[in-house]
Amino acid sequence: MESQHRIVVVLPHPDDEGIMAGTLARHIHQGKIVTYACLTLGEMGRNMGNPLFANRVTLPLIRKQELLEACKRIGIEDVRMWGYHDKTIEFEEQDKLSQRIAELLLELQPEIVYTFYPGHSVHPDHDATGAAVVQAVKKLPVSGRPVVRCVAFSSNRKDALGHPDVVNDVSTYVEQKIHAIHAHQSQVRFLLNNGTLDDPAFRAKYSKEVFWQYRFDD
């Protein structure tokens, strides 16, 4: 498949993809092929379902199945689980992780890579994953680099990064997006705070997805 039809997503945890599920669903509707490299199974997550149905032993397998179901609901068929340990991405050897990501990009030659903006993504795993993606892309020839679009959460993101480069209206896909997030049953109350699509404010909140494009200085 030619590179202009490929999208790669590199995120650390199951359920992270919900942040951009509408955008990914739209890409797939447009005929793009999405590959999702999920670095961990989120096995250190605090949430065990409500009411509780998981425990520390069963959570990884449960979250694996939730991830596969969420991706099915989005339309992602190529899901790669890399088996790193949750909450330790910042302690991985950065060169090795970035090289593994670079090899994935060389394999697929995507036009766009989605990840977290390093330094502006609140969680250490998010920041470390984004930093590894940036380092991986830097390993590639300038002429062959994909666009890197990042999610940022930090309170100073607009001051530091400016306004988002991409603002996607995903209202057409919002029901599909929420359906995908609901696949993460062990986490869904935390993710959605019991909101429903019957509430116009809730629907509007989840109908916009924003990204900052990472700009390389070489």
Image (tube, helix red, strand yellow):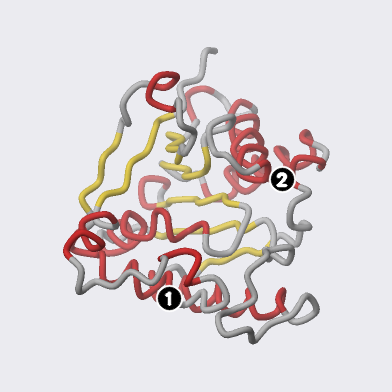
* Res. 203 image quadrant: bottom left
The three-letter amino acid code for the residue at tag 1 is His
Q: Does 53 appear above or below 35?
A: below
Q: Is residue 128 above or below residue 158?
A: below
| Residue 183, x across and y down, in percent | 47, 77
Residue 171 place in picture, x, y as percent: 19, 59
Is 59 situated above or below 157? Answer: below
Provide the secondary structure element on which disc 1 rests: helix
Q: Mark number for residue 20? A: none
Alpha carbon distance from label 2 to label 1: 31 Å
* Label 1: how many Cα within 10 Å (few below 14, some 14–19, many 20+): many
The residue shown at (78%, 75%) is 56
Q: Quadrant of the N terminus?
A: bottom left
Residue shown at the point (63%, 53%) measured from the top left: 12
Q: Could you tell me which residue is drawn at 51 percent across and 58 percent down?
A: 35
Q: Nearer the viewer, mark 2 or mark 1?
A: 1
Q: Amino acid at mark 2?
A: Arg
The residue where tag 2 is placed is 100
| Image coordinates for residue 213, horizontal then vertical, percent | 40, 30
Q: Earlier in the sequence, mark 2 or mark 1?
A: 2
Q: State the residue position of label 1.
A: 182
